Image (cartoon, rainbow, N blue to C red):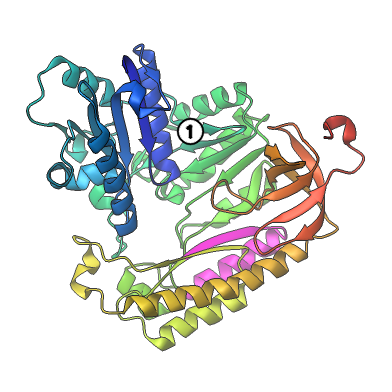
Amino acid sequence: MSNDRFHLVSLGCAKNSVDSDSMAELLRSEGYQISDSPEQAEILIVNTCGFIGPAKDESLSVLRELAERKKSGQVLIAAGCLTQRYGSEIVQQVVGIDGILGTRRWMDIVKVVKGLRKNDISEPIYHLPKFETVGKDEQGVLRASIQGASAYLKIADGCRRPCAFCAIPLIKGTAVSRPIEVILAEAKILQERGIRELNLIAQDTTDYGHDLGMRNGLVKLLLGLVDAVPQIDWIRILYAYPGYVTDKLIQVMADHPQVLPYLDMPLQHAHRETLKRMRRPANMEWVFETIEKMRRLMPDLALRTTFIVGYPGETDEEYQTLLNFVRDMRFDRLGVFTFSFEPGTSSEVLGDPIPQNVKEARRDELMLLQQQISLEKNQSFVGEELEVLVEGYGDGISLGRSYRDAPEIDGMVLVEGKLRIGEIVPVRINGAMPYDLSGLVEGRFSAIELL
């Protein structure tokens, strides 16, 4: 075990990955070295997720495992979402936690580590400043998580939306946008490092710049990025909020090939009354009109969405409306979650009356329907050529993603032969599966190394 090594476990979403990588960068700048093995590190850090019940359980499980294996001289720090909301409770549930670091104070990780190593620890050190103090001191750290030739770039944190089922505002506070000039400067750094794909992330990317006094802030940011980083091939928008996908945003996406014709817009449901109980936008006419407009201006649009089934009060009729909506709209990508009861949210008063087996049956039926739609969508690409970003290879097959596939959540393209990782190559599609495609490179063998 080395006293200048740290072991960091990052749980949850890509936004958490950015925070974890930022903490790691700060620690490395102070001379600490990262270790893949917890046994070889004095400092153990878990960046937790607290979004829904299963995520909480996973975070607690990882913390307990590290706490049970902790050796003399090691310190265990619980950071992130779960600790921000349930700091004292986590310390009671997991014996052996030495430090608590709240979300949006990731930049204080060095301070917490030095404090723990300096003092004789008898009680855990809590570092949970109020939200009014957060988001103002990033210390010049790159707010990105790099994975090969792809990177997540965080443009804002927190959320001001009133969704009844969501605990994010309780965990993260209200939305705080990062200055546009800082984001553009970071994008240029990523371009210099050879990044080919930039994934813009926030709790709600379409709310970017509202707190800075901007209208259509995301549009302004996209135009700035197109001008600032012409060598980054793909710019992808994740987590768009219904009702805030404006005509200007659609036009920018349609006019600039660099901005991918891909949008992740979680709709959560399709029945007006369910959406009202969720405190979500319930104007379904807007949804139909906007999707029709996007598909008209971007015929190759790939649209991802997310739904919740089993929300309190969801009747058979309301669920059937959702099922019919999915059948009619034919989304390219779709995720379905069963409702997770979250204490402290405004939906708490509704309870959790729908049995778990009913929730799961609805989820399974919806996903089975989407599986068939996804297969048919994929089959339409057989014989077509798609640009594919190569991410890995093995057993004579390279793995990559097309513009239709966001990292980690969507499908893959399996390509014959060994391609250079990080390259974007044209692939002729010759096979389709429910979620993935297969293909080969034609007439471009000088750009690849065949096994």
Seen from the viewer's position, the closer of residues 307 and 24 is: 24
Q: Is any part of residue 368 visible from this angle?
A: yes
Which residue shows up at 27% across the image and 51% down it? Answer: 169
Q: Is any part of residue 136 visible from this angle?
A: no
Q: Quadrant of the N terminus?
A: top left
Q: Residue furthest left?
A: 122
Task: State which quadrant residue 421 falls in.
Answer: top right
Label 1, residues with CA under 10 Å away: few <14, some 14-19, many ≥20: many
Q: Residue 296: within the magenta?
A: yes
Q: Residue 210: within the magenta?
A: no
Magenta range: 284-306
Seen from the viewer's position, the closer of residues 292 and 428 is: 428
Image side of residue 451 versus residue 164, left or right: right
Q: Position of residue 132 (x, y in %)?
A: 20, 38
Q: Position of residue 319 (x, y in %)?
A: 44, 81
Image side of residue 327 versus residue 90, left or right: right
User: How many numbered tags mark residues here?
Assistant: 1
The amino acid type found where label 1 is placed reads: Ser
Tell me: residue 317, above or below residue 97. Answer: below
Reading the image, the residue beneath label 1 is 145
